[in-house]
Amino acid sequence: MSMAVIGIFASDKGPGDPERASLMSQTGTLFARRGAQLLCLWENGGGPLPLMTAAKTAGGAVSVLADADAALPPTLSGLPVRVLPERVARHALFAEEAQVLVALPGSLASTSALFGSWASRQGRAKPVVMLNRHRAFEVVKGFAGDVLSHSVAGYDRNIQFADSVEDLWNKVSWVLEQKR
């Protein structure tokens, strides 16, 4: 898989969490080394800094869709940034450009952004893979099994849950292969 555009939702908001930062760094490094192009959101003055920094350091391609407050830190200088002040338009473009949406354990804001982007597709399935570390997405997993399984055709091919960063990459690769 070369240069697949992967939209990643992760957040470093909230109290310091070394494990969450480590997961972001591991994901950014692994995905960059595997040739993925990462697409990230920068909203309300923040974004998945450890993920973006790790991917950039590993030589990966990272691009950013940002709100009007698009002041990225110097460590991210040189990354392509497109500003779309309107949240709905930003999330719709994010979902349109990404071939797959990936969610890492993070904040309520990152989960809300994932849902906003996914919902903007209005019935056109976009694969989503979630890193269910410490059962972070267990509620979503239950919802998928109980509700989406009855209303969304092929939900089991388009919504995947991973247990580790390596498993995340494998599931992302699998869903992209299924689209071909």
Image: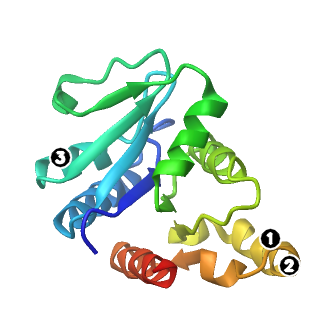
User: Left or right: where does residue 41 sit relative to residue 3?
Assistant: right
Mark on residue 146? Answer: 2
Mark 2 vs mark 3: which is more N-terminal? 3
Mark on residue 97? Answer: none
Q: Which residue is mark 1?
A: 143
Where is residue 95? Give x, y as percent: 56, 50
Q: CA distance from mark 1 to mark 2?
A: 5 Å
Residue at left offset 61%, top offset 41%: 92
Where is residue 176? Give x, y as percent: 44, 76
Residue at left offset 43%, top offset 74%: 172
Quadrant the N terminus occupies? bottom left
Of residues 113 and 138, the one nearer the viewer is 113
Residue at left offset 31%, top offset 62%: 27
Circle 1 crowding by C-alpha within 10 Å: few under 14, some 14–19, many from 20: few
Where is residue 81? Give x, y as percent: 33, 29
Q: Amino acid at mark 1?
A: Phe
Mark 3 vs mark 1: which is more N-terminal? 3
Q: Which residue is mark 3?
A: 56
Quadrant the C terminus occupies? bottom left
Asked whether disc 2 touches disc 3, contact meaning CB atoms under 8 Å apart, the reply is: no
Q: Amino acid at mark 2?
A: Asp
Residue at left offset 62%, top offset 47%: 117
Where is residue 105? Give x, y as percent: 51, 57
